[in-house]
Every structure is written in structure tokens, then in C-alpha cells.
Amino acid sequence: MTGVATMRRPRSLSEAIDTLAASPGADLLAGGTDLVPALRTGARPVREMISLRRIVELRARGAAGDWLTIGACATYADLAGWSLAPGLAATARSVGSPQIRNTGTVGGALGTASPRGDLLTFLVAADAGVVVTGPVGQRQLGIGRFLADRHGPDELVTAVKLARPCGPQTYLKIGARQTASIPVASCALVVDRVRRLVRCAIGGVASRPVRALAAEDHVAETADWSTGALPPDAAHRFGELVAEAVTTAPDVAGDDVYAPAAYRSHAAGVLARRAAARCLAGARGADARRP
Amino acid sequence: MTGPGAWPVPGADRALERARIGRSAPRPDGPAKVAGTFPYANDLRVPGMLHARTLRSPHPHARVRRIDATAARAMPGVAAVVTAADVPGVPTYGLIHPDQPVFAPVGGVARYVGEPVAAVAAVDGRTARRALAAIEVEYEPLEPLTDPRRAADPRTPPIHPNGNIYRELTLRHGDPGARGPVEVVDSYLVGQQDQAFLACEAALALPAADGGVDLMLATQWLHSDRDQMAACLGLPEEKVRLTLAGVGGAFGGREDVTLQIHGALLALATGSPVRIAYDREESFLAHPHRHPARMWFRHSATRDGDLIAVAARIVMDGGAYASSSPAVIANAVTHAAGPYRVPNVRVDGVVVRTNNPPCGAMRGFGVPQVTIGHEAQMDRLATALGMDPVALRLRNAIGPGDLLPTGQAVPPPLPVREVIEAVAAAPAPPPATAATPARDRPGGRGAQADPARIRRGTGYGVGVKNLMFSEGFDDSATARVVLELDRDGQPRAVVHTACAEVGQGFVTIAGQIARTELGLDAVVLAPADTAVASAGSTSASRQTWMSGGAVRKASVAAVDEVLRRVAASLRLPPAAAATPRRLLTLADGAVTGPEAGVSVGLADVLAAGGPVDVTETFRHRPTHPMDAFGQGDCHVAYACAAHRAVVDVDLDTGLVRVVELTLAQDVGTMLNPLSVLGQVEGGTAQGLGLALMEELVVTDGMVINTTFHDYLLPTAADVPPLRLIPIEQPAPEAPYGVKGIGEAPTGTATPAIVAAIRDAVGRDLRRVPVRPADLVLPPDPTVYLAPPDEDPEPQGPAEPAARDGMGLSDATPGAGTPPGPDQPPAPGASP
């Protein structure tokens, strides 16, 4: 990492936007959990860098009306105990080691957009909005659009917006080292008891998190929404449909060093069934259960 | 029995720092290592040094047509580029056979992905890396040979002038055709494990005024490196001087030369100090790994459970260069029957050359692979017999005086029975319940395993491992002890050996031995270097016995010299002066002799007569080569161990949590109980890694997972606390009765864990590491099927005769096949 060209350290968002406008495409440094190793190994060339670590406003998180807003530089550790967002907190707790959770950020997860990213999978299930800011101002993109189009070279991700939970949500994951490692397969399930629907995303199985739409519809139709309970055979079918969704995903990952593809779809089905059992057990009402 | 809580905490007792043998003296380098201030070889820096990088072949098999380094040499900041053309001495090196080129030469062949082609020294690492990119190399890709079974086929064209077979071994003991009424036959596959020491390879090379070179490096055997370097550099050995720098783990991965010659060549070419250091990815490519193995076994027993015969065939993939393959296969073959009394044994082992990454030494040295096989077979046999697996093992446990498959009588002690009984008697951990928190269930908190779908399993792994070098190798270790006065006029001892401290604790033990023998607290260890004669390799569980023996011998000689001087000054009668130990004792810094009425301070003796300076060489009893049938007194000594593993398996996901590990081990005499615990904890963790996660995945000669992101090492999340039950039976031939302890538990942890998983899920597991997919997906038959003339297909105990195979010499299926016509009865056979 010798010979860093320049490192700019803006103290405010507006200064960061100006800096980025002056050198579009510069590397953005927040937690550095992806960038620093890539620079060390030479996988990424060293060029201009903008550190976002001094911008306090990017670390803010809060609730307003129906929305939760999480600043792009909020770390996993910041989110791990957040009672307003139990699914997000569960996801944050499952990421890596304490060292990674203390430094890795929400914006970094979106910037890297690793198909195995824990947070990305949950954000897809939560149908999150991504706020990007550039010289012409702010705009909000749905997570799907963000992943498809990304953002301009003069823009940066400044926040993520989530609807306030309207039901239980969870994030389950299979990864080596008793899940301390990146997921082989993961499942985020968000239940909306007001709108009577669920959203389910599977991570680690394709080039981006896979939404299991048929499985979601099945739950919406078979759940008893007055109690929030899903009959056991419907939960079982939900697992099967999720496994199918993984198998038929357009760019599903093949066999690799972590697992054969067949294991991934099997594991996704098991996790989905478990997630449904946790979130759609009935009796507990709309209380979000923490894993 | 001793639980982890019973061990002393280092630092709690300052007096322990000066403890003598038998007590848990703390490591002198421990605090610095924990605090992060210990200087490892990677930390060495000198002003004005250059940074070196190595260009490696991206092909598993390719002819080097042309190398053009003109552009690289012309780059600003580049000091030198060296290739095969710049090697002044012998172009190849190797631990046993010098068959590996320093650099793949133009016109020659690069035989594995990662084989060095050139090296660059530049003002900084980035410039060196850019220079590598500027070196033009034209390769002509050749067809890679990556299937070890094809390499073993004599019809396959050789990929090296020395041929494709490193060594083929035949062992015939007793009646090779003997069979029993109960048989189990199966084949097993062991993946490729990496030593994965935490501090990657590093050295600092300094050109010397005499035309030689000084190297500070992390290695396991200074003198072996020096000899290989001197030959390739074309320098006399005395001009190649090596000093051990801080070593961050080794496990066999530093036995081979990697960056030593490259660094020295660049230092000599530039006249500047050169730092050469690998990152993890390069480390994975550069050093040899544990041999992947494919093994076929047939165990026969009486209906009462007495072993009658073991037949085995072992095919190991040695990769592109020989390294220590010839010795590894000898260990695999001679240990294939395990710690059991087997009257009739036939083992055929072969280790071959392929275009896969080279394989060599790794903790256990060929034994862990066969232990996985023979222990799986013992469990299968117990099932076939309807016997308890512990009872079957106890019934067949080998003991002192019994004959090993080599015809060698087991040298005492070998408490196989005791280690098995000890682990079997240890209390079982409490069962998992619905109240077990998710983080303690298989897969941890993330997987939220359903308690109703968790199954518990218990498994045993018993093994024996030879200690020290074998097959007639003239093994020696030298130590120098100097008794002198320090600047305050106080006596002190300086202990100087070339023994590589790689983390095993020799720096602790050497001090304890010297303090014990010299009766002196002030003992200083000189840095290990080539200024003193060889200590041999820090491997094969040998340094406490060998270099420890040398330190003891030199310390005893130093005491004798002191007593002789005192005796001479007292003008004792010649008879008494000749045996001064009868009258005089050196203890607590003074020579006393109550009968002679003497009390002289050691300081006075040294002040009067000058320093005492003695150098002694220690040798173990000689061994002998094996004959054509694998018979002979080829190993010095053995140590045995038994693990019991308890696992929980999530039947839905196939995730495994190792709940508990108990180890009973034959430890000889414990010179430092804490050090013993540290060694066996590490060995156990490494065995757990091989059982569950550690595998270098090689596809078409390419290593796919060259980072710790993808090559998974066990962490504290995976390894439960270890309960150690040391079985102390002093080895009469060894100094203080010690036995090497680092290797045996690596071999037994793996099969114990695999057996426990088998017990939990009820599947025959034939492949190690065991992956979650192996426990939940339908078994993939193609993994285990192989051509019928090579590997038999796996099957149960039914119809054993028809499945006899793997190209063994018996053409006729059926029981009781006699040795072939050209095979005389094996010597040393026991009925």
C-alpha cells in the first residue's frame, strides 16, 4: 500500500460531494474492510481516496414517521442492538467477527454489493430504499434498482431507508466457523402483518440476493393473518418453493469451494422453513422476535 | 486425570520463570508474542534494503520458451532481475532429491502453478511488483498430469527426467494371503491440508564483504537450508551464514527451501540487503502441503474380534517435486495397520509426481492420512462384529514387545491400552437440550438449528506415530554450553544450538534443562545460527529428545569440567580427581564437597580458570533401512494417543459442532506440562481442521482457495476446550524419558471427529474433510468410484474377495492368495 496518491478527508457531506465532484470515481473509504485488503493485494490500483470517516452526519440513524433512516457510515456494531429494527440487528450481529462489525459500514455493504453480503440480503427482503447524494442533490432508489443501475461516479450512498417493522423479521445464515464466516446461504424474512404479506430474500446463491416471489405469495395466501400463524405443511411448502426459487434463479452460482450448488438450494429451503417457523408461529402476535 | 483448569497460569508465579525440568516454566518469548512486539522474520528491516518479489508460472505444466527481462531491468527503481541463467551453482535443490529448479529455465519446464521463474529486487514492493509484470515470459502449455493414479501408471509419459514415481514401497509381514471370517473393505480419500503457519515466509539477505551472504530467516532447519543454498549459489558452506529470525509457526511447511536462494541471489547481485517476504497467497503457492491420499483397506478378523490381517494400498500425490515424499510414504506404509497387533500385513504404497502443488512434510508426516483409514476400518469392523468400538480396539491394542508390521518389536513404553481406557472412562459431556443456546448448537446463532433435529455422536481415534528420523538416517544434534562471568562478575551459562524455535517451546525447555544440569539460574540462550553444528530439523517430534539431549550432554560435560578444575586445585588423589562427581557437587552457583570440606564459588572457578566452553553432539540409537518387503528396525521410537470426540450434527443442514474433545497421550516424561498442553491443543485443532474444513482445493493443477477467506482454519468458535489426560511412562532411551508430543494428536483428532459424525448421522463417510453437503445430499457415487484395476468401489463387508483390487499383485480373487511366485516369504514374519 505504499505510495497512496492522495487521501482527502472531508468533514461534512457537502465537502465530500464537492471533493467527489472534483475527482469522480475516487475510492471511498469508510470501514475499509473490502477496500484495504484489495489495495494490499494489488487487486485494486491505488488512486485517489476520499475518507468518509470524519463525516459525523453519515453515522446518524433514527426513526421518523413510518421510516427508519440509517446513515451510510453506521457500522454493524451500531446496528447490532437496535431494537427498532430487529431484523437488521440480527443481520448485523451475524456479520464476521467483532473487529469487522466495529468497522464495516452499511454504505460499504452497498458499495461492494457482494452477492454474499449479509446486509444486502436483508435490505432486499426489507425492500429498502437507498439514498444517494450528488452535486444535483439527493435521490432515493429502490434496492433492486440500485443494484441494477448503481449510482453515478459523482454520487455517494448517504443513507438507507427502511419501513418500520410491521411484524416479525429474521435473518438466518449458514456459514463456516459456526457462521462467523461469509454465508454459504442465508435467508432474510420480513413479515408485514398490516399488509398481510412476507418478503423473503436468499443470499449467497447468485450474483445478487434472490427474491422467492412464488414462496412469498404462498405464505400470503395460506397464513392465518388474524393470528400471524402459518400451518406446518404450508411452512414446509414455503421451504420447498424457496429452494426451487434458488435452483431456477437466472444467474445461480455453481459448485464452488464453499459448497455444491445443490447444497445451497437445500440449505436455503431449510433456512426459509426455520425463518417461517420463527416469524409465523402465531401466538406471539406482531412482536418482532429477536433470534 | 487433569482438566484444563488444573494447569498453572504463566506469570502467576515469577519463580516459575527460572523453573527446572518438570515444572511449567512460561515461554520467555510469550509476553512479547501476546503483546505483538515479538520480532518475526517478516518484521526485519535494515536501512537501504531492497524488496524482492517472485514471478511464478501460471501454468500447471508448460515449457518456458523465452524470458525477456529487458524492460523490467530498465525500470527506474529496479535493482536486479534474476532467472535460472543467474544461478551460479547447481541449478536444482531439494530436501532428499535435488530435483526442483531454483527457477524454471528457458528451454526447461515449469511443473506446477506457482513455480518460480524469476525474481526481482527493487526499491519498494510496488516497484518490484510492477517489474514482475514487465517481465515477458513465453510459455508453451503442455498437457498437465493431475491424476495421481494416472501418474502411477507406467504407460504415462514422465513429466520429469527422474520419472513420475517418487517411491513405491511394498510391505509384507506374516502371511500376506491370510484372511479371516469377518472382513471389511473400503476406500478413503483425504484432501490436501496446508500448514497455514500464521507468519508467512520471510528472510532478510545481507551480502557480506567476503563474497558470501548472511541470511536471517524463518526456517525449521538452518543447516539443511545452508547446504542447499551453498550448492546453488556455488559458494563454500562457510560463506553462507544463516541466523534464525522469529518464526511464526512451521508444521513442516518450512522444511523446504522456498525464498532462501532467491533472496541470496538478489543480495549478491545487487550488493544490497534484500528483504524477501511472501503474502498469504504466495505462501500457499510456495511451500509444499500435506499429501492428499487415496487409500484402500481390507481388515480381517476372527469372529471374536482378533485382527488376522490388514491389507492396504495407498496412493499419495506428491505434486511436482520430490520434497520429502519418499519419507512420507514410508511413514504411511509402516503405520497403515495402526496401533494394533496384526500378525499378517501387506501394504503397497506409492507416491507419485504430478503437476499439482508439491507436497512434503506436515505435522504427522504421512501418518494422519492412514490413521483416518485404519480408524474408520476399526469402527466398521466393530459394527460387522457387533462389538463395542472401544472393546475391539482394546482387544487388539499393541504393546511393548509385540511385533509391528515392519517386524520391529515395539520399543517400550507404548501405553496404547492405557490411552484408550483413559479417554473411554472420561465423563461424557451433558447432552444438548432445547435449552442449549443457539450459539452453542451446530452452525451457531446464525443457523438457529432445531434442537429436535440435532443428533449427538461419539467417536474414537487411536494412533501411533514414530518419533525422529528413520530408515538409517544419521541423525544428530549439537549444543554448545559456555560457563562464563557476566559483566557483574556473576556466573552465567550461554546455551548455543542451531535448533529452530518455531513455536514448539525449545527455548523454554533448553533453559529448563540447562538450569537443572548446571544448578544455575542464569542461563542465556544464544540466537540459533550456523556458527554451531547442526541441530537437525525441528520436525519429526525430535527436538526435545535430540537438541534437548545435546543441551543436557553439553551441560553435564560443562559441570564435569568445573568439577575437574576444582578437584585439580584441591590436589585430590588421582583416583578421586578422575571421578570428581563422587566428591563434589555443583549447585546454586557453588561447588561443594562436604566430605572433602570444600565450598568454592563457581564465579571463583571461572575467574581462575577462564570460561568453560564445551560442545557436545547427541545421537539416538541407529535405525536401519527396510528390506524389499518393508521389514526392518526402521523407526527409533513411537508415541501413541487416543482422542474421543463428541459432536452435535444438525441433520437438516449438515452443520457440525464439536462439543468436546478428550485426549489421552503417551507423553513420556513431561519436562514442562504447560508446554505439553500447548502442543497437544494445537495438534488437536489442526486435526479438527482436517476433519471439518481445511482443504486446499486444486482443480486442473490450480489452487482455488489461496486466502484465509476461502481456506478455512478452525477458530475459537470451532474448537472446544481440550481435556488432556497425560500418560507418563518415561522412555528409557531418551533424555529424562521424554517423548515428542506435537504430532500424535494431529493424527488422532481427525478420525475421532469423523467417527463421531458417522455415529451421529449413520452415514459411511469416506472423504475427509467432511463437508456439510456430505451429510445431507445424496452420496455422489462418482466421488468414490474409480477404474476397477485401480480403486475398488466402496462397499460394505459383503463379498470381500470379489472386490479385492487397486491393481494389487494378486490376480486371483479369493481368500488365501499366497505371495506371488517371485516373492519369497517375508523375513521377520510372525505367524
Image: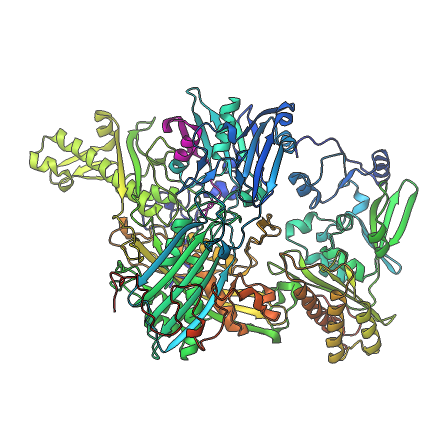
Asked whether residue A105 is in view, the answer is yes
Please tell me whether residue B589 belongs to the stretch shown in magenta: no
Q: Is residue B77 left or right of residue B675?
A: right
Asked whether residue B434 is in view, the answer is no
Q: Is residue B737 above or below residue B117?
A: below
Residue B5 in the image: x percent, y percent? 44, 59
| Rendered-image quadrant of the C terminus of chain A | bottom right
Q: Is residue A158 above or below residue A216?
A: above
The structure residue drawn at horizontal position 79% and vertical position 58%, both measured from the top left corner, is: A123
Residue toward you, A250 or B394 = A250
Residue A60 in the image: x percent, y percent? 80, 49
Residue toward you, B224 or B618 = B224
The structure residue drawn at horizontal position 86% and vertical position 72%, both measured from the top left corner, is: A196
Residue toward you, B407 or B101 = B101
Residue B106 in the image: x percent, y percent? 55, 33
| Rendered-image quadrant of the N terminus of chain A | top right
Write down the quadrant of residue B413 in the picture. Answer: bottom left
Q: Which residues are magenta?
A: B226-253
Write down the quadrant of residue B729 in the picture. Answer: bottom left
Q: Residue furthest right?
A: A136
Q: Is residue B706 left or right of residue B501?
A: right
Please tell me whether residue B238 belongs to the stretch shown in magenta: yes
Q: Is residue B451 left or right of residue A110?
A: left
- Total residue callouts: 0
Q: Is residue B161 above or below residue A189?
A: above
Residue A171 in the image: x percent, y percent? 72, 63
Q: Is residue B93 left or right of residue B602?
A: right
Residue toward you, A180 or B308 = B308
The structure residue drawn at horizontal position 77% and vertical position 56%, both measured from the top left corner, is: A208
